[in-house]
Image (tube, rainbow, N blue to C red):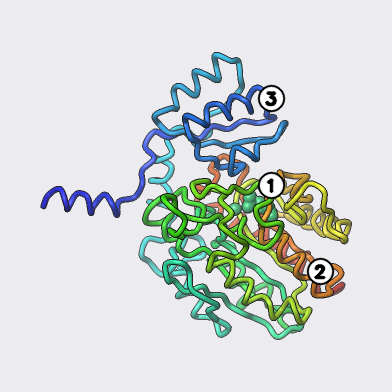
Amino acid sequence: MKLAACLIASAFANRRYEEDKVIALDNLSVGQITTLKTLNRVMNFNFWSPESVDELVLGGTADIQVSRFFANEFEEVFRANDLDYKVSIQNLQEQIDIETMFSRNNGKAHDLLKYNDYDTIKAYSQTFDGYFTYGTSFEGRDLFGVKVGSGSKVVSVDCGIHAREWISPAYCQWFMNEVRDGQFNQYLNDVTFVIMPSINPDGYVNTWNGDRMWRKNRNTGYGACVGVDLNRNYDANHAGPGASDRPCSDTYHGPSAFSEPESKAQQDHMKQYIDDGSLKAFLTFHSYSQLIIFPYSYDYTSQAPNKAELNSVGQEMSAAIRAVHRQSYEAGQGTDLLYAAAGGSDDWAYDAMLAAGNDGPLSYTFELRDEGRYGFLLPANQIQPNCEEIDAAMHVVINYVIENK
Ligand code: ARG
Ligand code: ZN
């Protein structure tokens, strides 16, 4: 009886990361990369940025969570080989506990300046006239959004495709509020906003009640390991570079494009706006690393036909963001800024708009704050400044749509 109770308790207990460290590396050298690859086979890192060992690039940066069992050995190997590294988080569990105490909206009313749980985000969304559901997640949760505005030009805004990136749904909620009751209200005659604040609800719930560092959805249909990386599951050179065919990988692309209920439902819902040409801009929010990414990311050779336009609007957004709180967000094509990562929703939406006859689609992936100090555990006191600077970028892209699309 005691044992059973204990087993049940542990099955529901949060996964803990006592004494895990996060290691930060920059200007990656051949030596650092080969050492990381070797150590990873034994130490099985949890990659924060980039999201897998295959995405490490020479000269790039990396943030890597090292489990407590290997943290000392990791540092010894790096020091013995004269390789640079920095410890950005000494004790991951401590950071998670601080977040739980001060940044979560623990059972209180909806709060734009805290991280809200799935039920609270949904209840808040239901206060909007344009609330809609567009499907059901793997575990049976509602996929939902709000549609606001009467304009003929549709701007799609989605958040939370990756579960652990909590600032992303926080921005969607902030934006929804500003659309209905604030500074974006002025656009509602010209634009219709389709906003989906939590497009991976099972993953998000798991980061609240199970594993704070979870990224994927919660599909259990692919063997011993759980979850598909939804941002590798869209029909955009599916299973191409930067996506893994191993279900245990954090970048597992799934058995086929749109195999997952969450990605498939978004495709089905957006089809009407793509086919009738009303969809002008597709904006999807992630964290972290402060970037504005445009297509393509799905291979190393494709160039967007309106790359110059995507770039100039991207640079303008970056400048507008900088003017608010002096934060730097680099704008560029995915494969120039990062690495190839096929199957992303940005590239899918872009190509779908092109195929429907839109000759200048806008599609951007935003990587919100920060640049690695807290990473996914961005304290809630940065929600407001982060949202304020992103608002500036939103004004740029919305005005661009109104004037040019
Ligand atoms: N960090 C994001 C991801 O890996 C970047 C997405 C950029 N777009 C893309 N299609 N890979 O999902
Ligand atoms: Zn992400």
Amino acid type shown at disc 1: Pro
Q: Residue tagged by mark 2? A: 354
| Earlier-in-chain disc, 2 versus 1 | 1
Relative to 332, 381 lies left or right? left
Give the residue at x 29% y 54%. 12
How far apart marks 1 and 3 lie (CA) works out to 20 Å
- Cβ of mark 1 under 8 Å from ligand 1: the answer is no
Q: Residues within 10 Å of mark 3 (few under 14, many from 20)?
A: few
Q: Residue tagged by mark 1? A: 241
CB contact under 8 Å: marks 1 and 3? no
**What percent of the width, then of the height, locates residue 395?**
75, 66
Residue 23 picture quarter? top right
Q: What element carries label 2?
A: helix
Give the residue at x 74% y 75%. 279
Relative to 1, 34 lies left or right? right
| Earlier-in-chain disc, 3 versus 2 | 3
Amino acid type shown at disc 3: Val
Amino acid type shown at disc 2: Leu
How far apart marks 2 and 1 lie (CA) works out to 22 Å
Residue 208 picture quarter? bottom left
In the rendered image, is residue 55 in sight?
yes
| Earlier-in-chain disc, 1 versus 3 | 3
Q: Residues within 10 Å of mark 1 (few under 14, many from 20)?
A: some
CB contact under 8 Å: marks 2 and 1? no
Q: Residue tagged by mark 3? A: 30
Residue 202 picture quarter? bottom left
How far apart marks 3 and 2 lie (CA) works out to 39 Å
